[in-house]
Image (tube, rainbow, N blue to C red):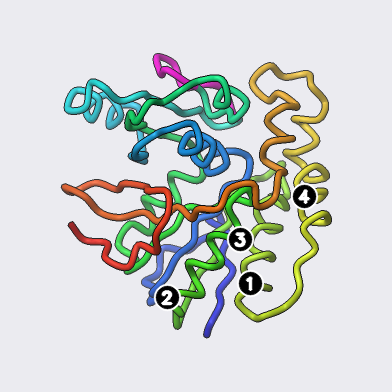
Amino acid sequence: MQISRVSLFGLMQDPHDFDTVVAIDVLRSFSTAAYAFAAGASKIHPVATAAEAAYLLERMPQALTMGALPGGRPMPGFDLGNSPSSMPTRSFAGRPVILSTAAGVQALIRFRDAPRLFAASLVCAGATLRALQAIEPRRVALITTGEWIDRDGDEDIACADYLAAGLLSQPVDRAALSQRVRDSDFGRRFAAGTDPALPPSDLDLCAAVDRFDFAMPVVREHGGLVMHAGGTGADRAK
């Protein structure tokens, strides 16, 4: 098995031959997505822009919109921000979610044509690993999305380390991985508690390694991408 580690924002636009791609966003896109599924969301539709979200909402008026601008501010006009601490008390009651964020979702869009595609974070890393082991990929890419000019992205690198270690049958120190989320550049901004868009409660939820027992495969449905809770995404085209 060939395992590639790729930073989304350092990525060249060259062709690739990955048969499996895992897009990682711990703070916060794919942690928030996992909490939304746990709160009852039926499907999550990742879209690149607010305009695409508005178009999709016309077709699915029952959907909730969720997302954030670069830096974490809530997306204007959306029902929810990209904040998992808003999930536990809200019942999604089987409703679909339309998700647009500046990092994790953009990675899914970039690799939308990969034969197998997953969204991942530390809260569902173990389940993601088991899904990968079940499909036995030949060339898997772990795409980290948190590195910016002013951010080390170590929260995502920690998740990539978990997956790579598991695929190579190496041990994983979950407590150390959780601490790396807190110690990352972006994690420290949440811990400071000075930005209402970055609450410390989100940091606690995103650092909860293996809280959920489902992977989040992303498939093509009716021309768009759809994220599910559970499964391996073995049959992507629909």
8 or 78, nearer to the observer: 78
**Marks 4 and 1: CB-CB under 8 Å?**
no
Given the image, on which type of amino acid does mark 2 rest?
Ile
Q: Distance between the residues labelled 4 and 3?
A: 13 Å
Please report whichever mark, 2 or 1, sits nearer to the chain's N-terminal start.
2
Q: How far apart are marks 1 and 3 (CA)?
A: 11 Å
- Left or right of 145 on screen, residue 235: left
Boundaries of the magenta span = 72-80
Whole-percent x and y of residue 207? 72, 43
Given the image, on which type of amino acid does mark 4 rest?
Ser
191 or 33, nearer to the observer: 33
**Marks 1 and 3: CB-CB under 8 Å?**
no
Q: What's the magenta bit mostly, secondary-structure-wise?
A: loop
Q: Is residue 147 visible?
A: no
**Marks 4 and 3: CB-CB under 8 Å?**
no
Residue that badge 2 annotates: 135
Q: Is residue 112 visible?
A: yes
Residue that badge 3 annotates: 126
Whole-percent x and y of residue 21? 45, 65
Residue that badge 4 annotates: 178
Q: Tell me if residue 55 comes above or below residue 218 in the rendering.
A: above
Q: How far apart are marks 2 and 1 (CA)?
A: 15 Å
Given the image, on which type of amino acid does mark 3 rest?
Gly
**Which residue lies at the image location 43% right of the left edge and 46% below the top edge?**
106
Residue depth check, mark 4 versus mark 3: number of the one nearer the observer = 3
Residue that badge 1 annotates: 164
Q: How far apart are marks 3 and 2 (CA)?
A: 15 Å
